Image (cartoon, rainbow, N blue to C red):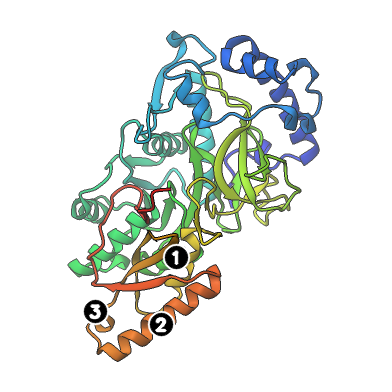
Amino acid sequence: MKIWDPLHECMPREDLEQLQLERLQATLNRVYRSVACYKKKFDEAGINPEEIRSLDDLSQLPFTTKEDLRLNYPYGMFAVPLREVVRIHSSSGTTGKPTVVGYTKNDIHTWSNLVARFMTAAGVTHDDVVQIAFGYGMFTGAFGLHYGSETIGASVIPMGAGNTEKQIMIMQDYKSTVLVSTPSYAITLASRMEQLGIDPKSLSLKVGLFGAEPWSEAMRKEIENRLFISATDNYGLSEIIGPGVAGECECKCGMHLSEDAFIAEIIDPDTGKVLPRGSVGELVLTTLTKEAFPMIRYRTRDITSLDYEKCACGRTMVRMKKTMGRSDDMLIIKGVNVFPSQIEEVLFAVEGCEPHYQIVVEREGEMDKLEVHIEVTENIFFDEMKKQKGFVEMVEKKIHSVLGVGASVKLVEPASLPRHEGKAVRVIDNRKL
C-alpha cells in the first residue's frame, strides 16, 4: 500500500507526541497573542500558555464551541490579518449566523497534503480520474477533495452536486475512476443507473470517497455491491480544516487521524471530562498547524472512539471509528439515546428494505412517538395485507431489540421519500422541546 507522507504517517508515537507538544505550545502562545477570544478564555480560567508543558495539560484548557464562532462573527477568531487570508469558507448559517473560517496560503498547502494522505490511503493515484459530486461554494468538501486530487496528480472533474443523469453520462464518457460524494448520493446514483438499465460494471469506477454524513457498514456494503467499487470513509469539518482530518486506508478498519496536525481527545459530552483510551464519547480537536484559523479544544459534537493500535497498513497514527452520530443531534426517546445510524443498520440487514428511510418523531401528550418510514421493494409494498403486517412486525421487533425502545414502521413506495443531492435529511423531529 502506498503512503503519501511516510515520515509523519508512520512516525513512532514517542516522536509524534513530542512533535505535538512543540506545535501545541507554539499554537497556544500565538492564539493568546492574536485572538482576543482565546486571551479572554485563558485569562478567565487563570491559565498561562507557558504553563502547558505536557500533552496531559491540554485538559486544563477551556473548550471552544460553535457559539464562540458565532459570537465572534465574522473574523473575530482569525489569528492573522485579513490581508493574509486567501480563502474564506462558511457554514450555511441555517441555525443563525454562519461560522466563518479562513485559510492562508500555507493553510491551503497543508490542507491539500492532508487530503492527499487519505486519498492515497484509499488507493487513489496520479493515474486516476476523480469525479467530484459535492457542491462547490462555501462548503469545504468539494474544494478539499479537489486540492487533494490535484496534489496527487490525478485528473479532476469538478462536476458539483446534482444533475444525476449527467453525472452518470460523465462517468461513462470521461472514464471516471474515483467518485467523491455523500454516501446517500452514491445510492441515488446506483438507483438511477438501475432505472436507466446501465450496468455499473461497464463503468471505470474503482474507488468511492464518501463523507459529510454518518453512514453504516451496511450502507458501505450496499454501495460496494451496487456500484462495484471500494467504498471508503473520510472525516473533516470546516471549523477544523474541512476534509483531511481523518480517512480510511484500504484495510477499512478505522480512519487514520493526522495527529501531526491535530490533537484528538474523547470526552464525556455531559461532563466534559476526558475519557480513557478506547471509550466512546464526543470528539474534541485542537489544530496544530493552522495559521489563519487555529482552534483549541473544539467540541465537534461527533460521537466516536479512537484506536491506538498500529494498523496493518503500516501507519501509526490513531484510527477514528465511524461517527455514530452527533451528541447534539442525538434523539432522546423515552429517556433512551437513539442515533439514526442504529436504525440504518437494522434496515440494511432486512431483505426487501430499500436504502432510503426517514425517522419522524412526534409528541402525543407527554409521550414521544418514534415512526420510521422505509421504502420497500414493489413486491413487498403491493403484497397482501397479512404479509405486509408480518413484515412490519418483524422490522419493528428488530428495531426494538437494538434501540431498547419501540418504533412504529410505515412502509412507503419505492422512490417516494425525498432525495437530496447533499446530506440526506434522515430525521424530522416535530416535537416542540
Of callouts 1 and 3, which one flags the residue occurring earlier in the amino acid sequence?
1
Q: Residue at x 35, y 47 (%)?
A: 129
Report the amino acid beneath label 1. Glu
Is residue 35 visible to the viewer in this orientation of the structure? no
On the image, the x and y values in percent for residue 164 come to: 22, 53
Q: Which residue is mark 3?
A: 378
The reply to whether the C-beta atoms of the residues labelled 1 and 3 are less than 8 Å apart is no
Q: Which residue is mark 2?
A: 393
Picture layout, residue 99 above or below residue 209: above
The reply to whether the C-beta atoms of the residues labelled 2 and 1 are less than 8 Å apart is no
Of callouts 2 and 1, which one flags the residue occurring earlier in the amino acid sequence?
1
Element at label 2 = helix
Report the amino acid beneath label 3. Glu
Q: Residue at x 54, y 75 (%)?
A: 401
The reply to whether the C-beta atoms of the residues labelled 2 and 3 are less than 8 Å apart is no
Element at label 3 = helix
Picture layout, residue 135 above or below residue 221: above
Quick one: 238 or 343, which is closer to the camera? 343
Quick one: 21 or 93, which is closer to the camera? 93
Which of labels 2 and 1 is toward the front?
2
Q: Is the residue marked by circle 1 packed among few (<14), some (14-19), or many (20+) residues within 10 Å?
A: many
Quick one: 352 or 155, which is closer to the camera? 352
Residue 344 is tagged as 1
Picture layout, residue 425 above or below residue 194: above
Report the amino acid beneath label 2. Glu
Of callouts 2 and 3, which one flags the residue occurring earlier in the amino acid sequence?
3
